Image: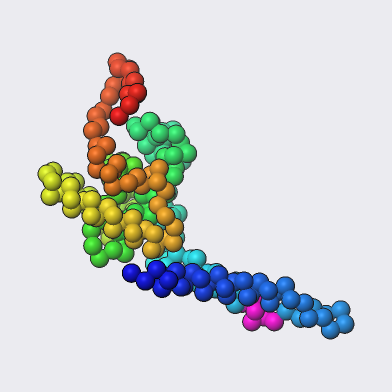
Amino acid sequence: MNVLSDFAPFILYKILIRLAEKLITFEIVIGVTLIMPKLIVFFYYHIKTIFLSPKMNHEQLKLWDKIKKFELDDPEISLSFTDRLARENGWTIEYATRTISEYKKFIFLLTLANHPLTPSDQVDQVWHLHLLYTQSYWEDFCKNTIKKNIHHGPTKGGDHEKEKFTNWYEKTKELYTEVFQSEVPKDIWPSNEIRFSEINFQRVNLERNWIIKKPFK
């Protein structure tokens, strides 16, 4: 791997931005008039868009905007989707809200990918809950928003399945970085090791049981 070639676009971007900043701040004064060529301004602001915006075409941007704006919470009910998600997983509302955003990103990636993807367990919990809201998921979301039915396929168990899903999970995070131009949040998308080792979950009746955290793993 040529490390220099990997960083060349980023280095070029930094050089061009610095050059544009110098040109913008360079004052050519004729009398009291400041000359600021429109081309320089256009170059400065649009090069940032080229390098830093998510890598999507026009149609993909429109779809992503629809998914982002899709409302999971029904304002007419007292226990909202976010409230239920937080309650059932022992999360704060803030963390549940962030995880819903990551779920929407994952669904968007599924509409783009030409290979299978795997969510983090946290994102998977949002997906599980959304599937229970059948009208919202199948009609409002799949049919009317993304125009595509997305089914949830759980593991069949065994080492082969674990290896397969680990590979898909890694590819999911790589695609996330490529499309959204940012790393996955580690508290919602943990490492492969954590994702596929910390999976011993059970429903617990908190009215009859206490939960005491282990002092060590």
Which residue is rendered at x = 42% and y = 60% of the image? 180
As drawn, which residue projects farthest toward the bottom?
30
Q: Residue at x 63, y 75 (%)?
A: 20
Q: Residue at x 34, y 42 (%)?
A: 122
**Quarter of the view holding residue 33:** bottom right
Residue 4, picture quadrant: bottom left
Question: Relative to residue 120, is residue 13 depicted above or below?
Answer: below
* Magenta segment includes 100: no
Q: How far from the left and from the top, in percent, is residue 188?
A: 38, 44
**Left or right placement of residue 23 versus residue 8 in this view:** right
Q: How is the image coloured?
A: rainbow
Visible residue check, residue 126: no
> Against 203, is 195 above or below?
below
Q: Residue at x 15, y 49 (%)?
A: 161
Nearer to the camera, 183 or 136: 183
Q: Furthest-right residue in view?
A: 31
The secondary structure that most of the magenta stretch takes on is helix
Q: Dividing the picture into quarters, in which one does residue 123 lie?
A: top left
Image quarter of the C terminus: top left
Number of numbered markers: 0
Q: Position of residue 31 (x, y in %)?
A: 87, 82
Q: What are the residue bounds of the magenta stretch?
A: 37-42
- Residue 40 is inside the magenta segment: yes
Q: Is residue 117 visible?
A: yes
On the rendered structure, is 90 left or right of 53? left
Residue 113: x and y, percent? 28, 63
Relative height, residue 121 to residue 53 (above, below): above
Quadrant where the N terminus sits is bottom left
Q: Is residue 178 left or right of residue 12?
A: left
